[in-house]
Amino acid sequence: MQKKLESFFRFFLAAKNKDLPNKNAVYKLFVKWFEQNIDTVGTEGIFKEIVKYAEYHAIVYRKKLSEIEKELQQPLKEFRNIASDMPAPMLLELLNMESKKIITAEQVGGVIDLTNTYLIRRALCSLDTSSITRLFPSLLKNVIEDCKGDYSNVLEIFKKNLINKNRGNAMYMPDEQQLKEAVINANMYNIRTTTRLFFDKLELHNNSAPVDLTTLSVEHLMPQTPTGEWYEELGIDEDTYQRNLHRLGNLTLATKVDNSIMKNKVWKYKNAVLAKTGHLTINQELLKIDHWNINEIDKRTVDLINQINMLYPYTPSSLSMASRVDIQITANDIIATGHLDLDNGSVEIDAGSEAVPAKHLSETQCQDDLRQELLEAEVLAETENGYKFIKPYTFYTKYVNSTALSQSAGFLLCGSRNGWDYWLDDNGKSLGENQELRKKLS
């Protein structure tokens, strides 16, 4: 219970500040938020605000779907199945905006649907989650700023900030080609929880008849323990067998009882058992196949990938994006490169960039909490001379009409730094000398 309470207050503060606090800083930041608001709304007002967000949290995670607005039921059901906490701060604030009639339930549902698609596509491609841990509070901030008080096009603006803006960085949503390349030969049984979410959605898609999925599990068609009969029927060696065993096309849904009966028997017998679940969409085409082989696995894998793209579509925004400026720091014995986003002032640090020279670690402004968090997430690695980014990482500004130049420079150089002075352009000149750029970002 204590961990759940700590988690809620972390999400609450992230929704309020549009920045995810470190776990060990939640109490300190809550006290700061309390002191900033006590004179304005009073103790009772603060208590009511916390209770209100607790109700939003219940809507996202616990409340019966039948008691939730119709437009949110299906998106939240799928979100709960995905079981991700990362978007929680954003969802809490969206529900708050809906309660104030700023956006509609339909718009909130659309954002949750897109968030689900983003999470599922990344999970099916086995992409690392550490790079998106802090994404959603900042994403919410950027969307609000982009809307400029007019939320009639909020879903399209959300697409722009989530999909378009993250192309080419570690937080990207895989497009159709990228997803195909990642999934076509992948071990999908290793991520069968996510594979199961896809199979379930496929089974329920356009299916007016109720389907009980609770007795089903993800099972293999070519068995995990092959017999000589399977090798003989397929005409392949053990290496080829193992390379294809866990591919998407060789997996399906079956009852545990049927799977126990099928075991490692040959296809003709196994297919007869599968006929018991022939009413399942995912198994209907299998019943037409006389011989199961690698070619059939290839074809079925491609077909299922097409189904993924249909159920979880890649839908970038048609809105134009601001460009990015390549930037670099060469100071205090470090070399770092990155990109300044002209649309929101964020700074993405490239993998390979150096940070925090060892001789400066005793200074008081070295952002120890963030450094430790990035080390644990394997974004940062310790070297003989300090630290190095082994994955890209994005710093987001905490203020309107500002940039993360100073925040990122302060982390890299270990101390308070004016980012406009320390970050340089391609010509080696400080960004502060570019008056046009400063005007654009102020």
Image (cartoon, helix red, strand yellow):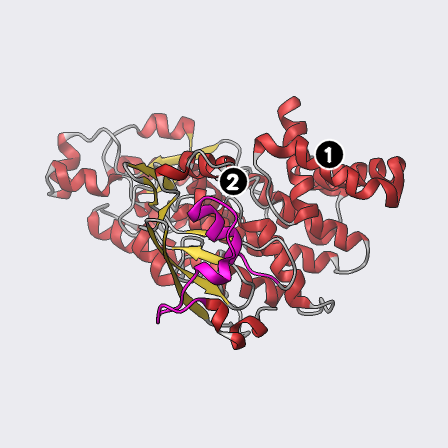
Residue 188 place in picture, x, y as percent: 34, 42
Question: Quick check: 198 left or right of 116?
Answer: left
Q: Is residue 224 left or right of residue 327?
A: left
Determine whether the residue tagged by mark 2 lies in a helix, strand or loop: loop
**x, y percent for residue 293:** 21, 47
Query: In this view of the protein, can residue 208 be seen by the observer?
Result: no
Q: Quadrant of the C terminus?
A: bottom right
- The kind of residue on which mark 1 rests is Val
Along the line of sight, the residue nearer the viewer: 117 or 254: 117
Instruction: Using the image, determine if residue 244 lies above or below residue 110.
Output: above
Q: Quadrant of residue 148?
A: bottom right
Q: Point out the stretch of residues depicted in magenta.
A: 402-430
In the picture, residue 260 is in which quadrant?
A: top left
SS for callout 1: helix
Question: What residue would you read off at disc 1?
Answer: 31
Q: Residue at x 11, y 43 (%)?
A: 235
Residue 365, which numbered label? 2
Q: Which residue appears at 36% of the width and 37% of the height?
A: 359
Disc 1: CA contacts within 10 A as few (<14), some (14-19) or many (>=20): few
Q: In this picture, is 90 found above or below 163?
A: above
Query: Is residue 276 or residue 202 the one in the foreground?
Result: 202
Residue projecting furthest to the top:
1
Taking the image as shown, residue 140 lies to the left or right of residue 343, namely: right
Q: CA distance from mark 2 to mark 1?
A: 21 Å
* Viewer-closest of 407 and 122: 407
**Front label number (2 vs 1):** 2
Magenta stretch holds residue 300: no
